[in-house]
Image: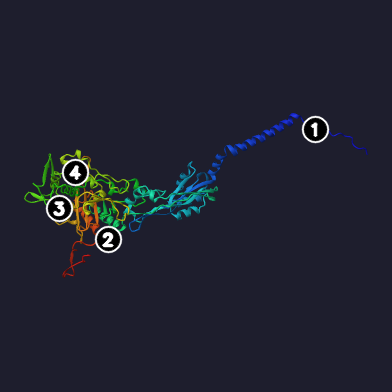
Amino acid sequence: MKASTRKIVAPQFAVWRVRAVAYGLLVGFAVLAGRGVYLQVVVHDDLTKRGDARTTRDLVLPAHRGRLLDREGAVLASSVPARGVFAFPDQVELTAPQREGLAKALNLRPKDVDQKLDTERDLVFLARGISPEQGQAIAALKIAGVVVQTEFKREYPSQEVMGQVLGITNVDDLGQEGLELAQNDWLSGKPGLRRVTIDRRGSVVEEHGSLRTPQQGRDLQLALDSRVQHLAFRELKRGVDAHRAKGGAVVVLDAKSGEIVALANYPTSAPGDRAAAATGGLRNRAVADLFEPGSTMKPFTIATAIEIGVLKPDALIPMLGSTYTLNGATIRDSHTIGSNGVASVTEIIQKSSNVGTAKIAERLPNEVMWRQLQRAGFGRAPQTGVPGEAHGRLRAPQSWRPIEKATMSYGYGLSVNLVQLARAYTVFANQGALVDVTLLKNGGAARHTTVYSPTTIRDVLPMLEKATSKEGTAPLAQVAGYRVAGKTGTAKKLAGATYSEGRYVASYVGLAPVSNPRYVVAVMIDEPSGGIFYGGQVAAPVFSSVMGQTLRLMEVPYDAPLPTLPVAGETVIAIARERN
């Protein structure tokens, strides 16, 4: 067979087509390479951030806030574990049962849950400070995009008794009112951060480590004594309720150290009640409310006159009836004091004479009287460290008219807060030295500032003790087994530019035991409306109860005979023997 002689002819392509394809491929590779460079170099950081934003989160590691302790170490405020629930709205996927379960666990309606999730924000909190049990119930629902985290919630075992003093924290456990705010830097820790990768359900799938380790807060020990605070609150509440008053406050001071052992306010609200804070329910009356002190100022007028030598302790003051007219203004006493047209300085204090005090004030140069009042702390904040502390009002002496100086001598025309007034009375407990007050336990270390000489105080203190006798204005301030010295105050309240009839502030400030003063107690009752409004009838009984229980609680030795009681109709015997 003869071999085929057919010729195989190769296909012919136009050169331009080959080149077009080649160029096309080159351009394609160039575009891809350029895109790769653009993605890997030009916008790499932005793309990384956008990717991380979807999968990487920096979660806060809460720091434990320090505790507030009383002077004996009892816990007044502490942070306990709680749970916070947050969500990534763009990742949340809810079935109908999950929506119902989430709403039930959060005590919300299903539509409220939907409203919270209907947002453009990347992250939204659904709840803060809920119980661990609630958090566990929500975690068990396994909802995509919903995360339960551990945090802390503030608790106050003392409840309403210390509400205004301790204050509150916000949902982030940061101080907002009271000592929680004032001492926030000390109590607060520094939260930490940890970086994690989450999946589409919001679950952590990878830990990248801690970015910042949390630093725990520090405990703070206060001067407050829980036992004294509770009894002061109880007695104050009884006094306010009994006289249908608008409110009141009690301050118990350690006369030597200046430590505030109790600071009670009524009415009050429970610590942690943020709604009460918004409406003024956490206002600390003892440091924020100003009032005219009335006759509690008389001892300072008389002490100043004795101090500068214009008055002898045994002097007799002319008293012509129960009124005195000064520059056309009439000063009145509620009753006539003295005999034969004169009254002793002791009687003026004991019977609380406005007329006698005004006549003594006439002997004082304005500058001298002002200087001594300022040295005693009037017109200056007592520096308790509590937010909202008022300074009080004490006008410059250059503007005083004679009638103004007269009225200031018995407590009108100036204003104080209760802590300020209690602090001023420490001069009578410390031989003329004013003590700095504090809400923090100071171990007895307090600054003393001389205001009066010990000789002047030795002259005035017996006068204040006489004021609590049966012939004085405050026999109801007496404390069984202890000598008590103090002064009543009853002042009308200002309503605009005039004094209102029927609206009074009743007060009493005193110290005990007189032989070696240990405590100063100040009581203020605002607008008693039960028909009785005098400080000796309204505030003095509260003082007696608080002071007596405090002295016995602290086992302070008696310095006066105890009362006697008949036993089984037979002989009268002492109910207890005097302590040594």
Q: Are marks 2 and 4 in contact (CB under 8 Å)?
A: no
C-alpha separation, residue under disc 3 versus residue under disc 1: 135 Å
Q: Which mark is residue 11?
A: 1
Amino acid type at mark 4: Val
Secondary structure under the numbered disc 4 in the rendered image: helix
As drawn, the residue found furthest toward the left would be 340
Q: Which mark is residue 554?
A: 2
Circle 4 residue: 368
Q: Nearer the viewer, mark 3 or mark 4?
A: 4
- Residue 450: x and y, percent? 23, 49
Give the residue at x 17% y 45%: 409
Amino acid type at mark 2: Met
Circle 3 residue: 350
Q: Are marks 2 and 3 in contact (CB under 8 Å)?
A: no
C-alpha separation, residue under disc 1 versus residue under disc 4: 125 Å
Relative to 132, say whether 118 is above or below.
above
**Dot 1 alpha-carbon crowd within 10 angstroms: few under 14, some 14 to 19, many 20 or more:** few
Secondary structure under the numbered disc 3 in the rendered image: helix
Question: Which badge, 1 or 2, comes first in the chain's sequence?
Answer: 1
Question: Which badge, 2 or 4, comes first in the chain's sequence?
Answer: 4
Q: Nearer the viewer, mark 1 or mark 2?
A: 2
Secondary structure under the numbered disc 1 in the rendered image: loop
Question: Which badge, 3 or 1, comes first in the chain's sequence?
Answer: 1
Residues 546 and 448: in front is: 448
Residues 384 and 162: in front is: 384
Amino acid type at mark 3: Gln
Secondary structure under the numbered disc 2 in the rendered image: loop
Q: Is residue 314 left or right of residue 150?
A: left
**Dot 4 alpha-carbon crowd within 10 angstroms: few under 14, some 14 to 19, many 20 or more:** some
Query: Is residue 244 among the parts visible in the rendering?
Result: no
